[in-house]
Amino acid sequence: QVQVVESGGGLVQPGGSLRLSCAASAKISNSGNGYMGWYRQAPGKQRELVATVTSGGNINYVDSVKGRFTISINNAKDTVHLQMNSLKPEDTAVYYCNIKRFSGERAYWGQGTQVTVSS
């Protein structure tokens, strides 16, 4: 099993910033098309992909966070961060880190970290 641990969530006012971190016990594989990323799930809502980064550095964001969130991966390719700026109330959710080491393997999830954007 791959251990995935998120941190950095909290309560912030609209327009504020948070930085989430995710440390995994394994690295993603470039040759196997691995990725790490962040999903979020608000109460009563579907879990949605927020941002992903591949071992090769390709990055994708959901449209609603483009220009506000930045995902990054470390050189060891086992840790990702999500810098969240200009936060909006609709960003309120539990944020889950996701790692897929290679395309043929299941994804592994962290326990989630709560992000609340409220005045």
Image: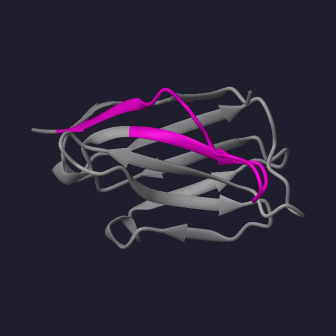
Residue 62 versus residue 107 in the image, above or below: below
Tell me the quarter of the picture where residue 13 sits. top left
Residue in view at x 79 percent, y 55 percent: 102
Task: Indicate the quadrant containing the C terminus: top left, top right, bottom left or bottom right.
Answer: top left
Task: Indicate the quadrant containing the N terminus: top left, top right, bottom left or bottom right.
Answer: top right
Residue 25 versus residue 87 in the image, above or below: above
The magenta stretch is 95-117
Q: Nearer the viewer, residue 29 or 67?
A: 29
Tell me the quarter of the picture where residue 58 sits. bottom right
Residue 42 place in picture, x, y as percent: 25, 43
Residue in view at x 28 percent, y 46 percent: 16
Residue 61 place in picture, x, y as percent: 48, 68
Residue 115 versus residue 91 in the image, above or below: above
Residue in view at x 76 percent, y 41 percent: 78
Q: Residue furthest left?
A: 119
- 107 on left or right of 85: right
Residue 28 place in picture, x, y as percent: 79, 49
- 47 on left or right of 38: left
Residue in view at x 52 percent, y 48 percent: 82
Q: Nearer the viewer, residue 83 or 64?
A: 64
Residue 110 place in picture, x, y as percent: 55, 31
- 52 on left or right of 117: right
Q: Is residue 62 magenta?
A: no
Q: Nearer the viewer, residue 44 or 96?
A: 44
Q: Nearer the viewer, residue 119 or 21?
A: 21
Q: Residue furthest right?
A: 31
Residue 2 versus residue 65 in the image, above or below: above
Q: Is residue 108 magenta?
A: yes
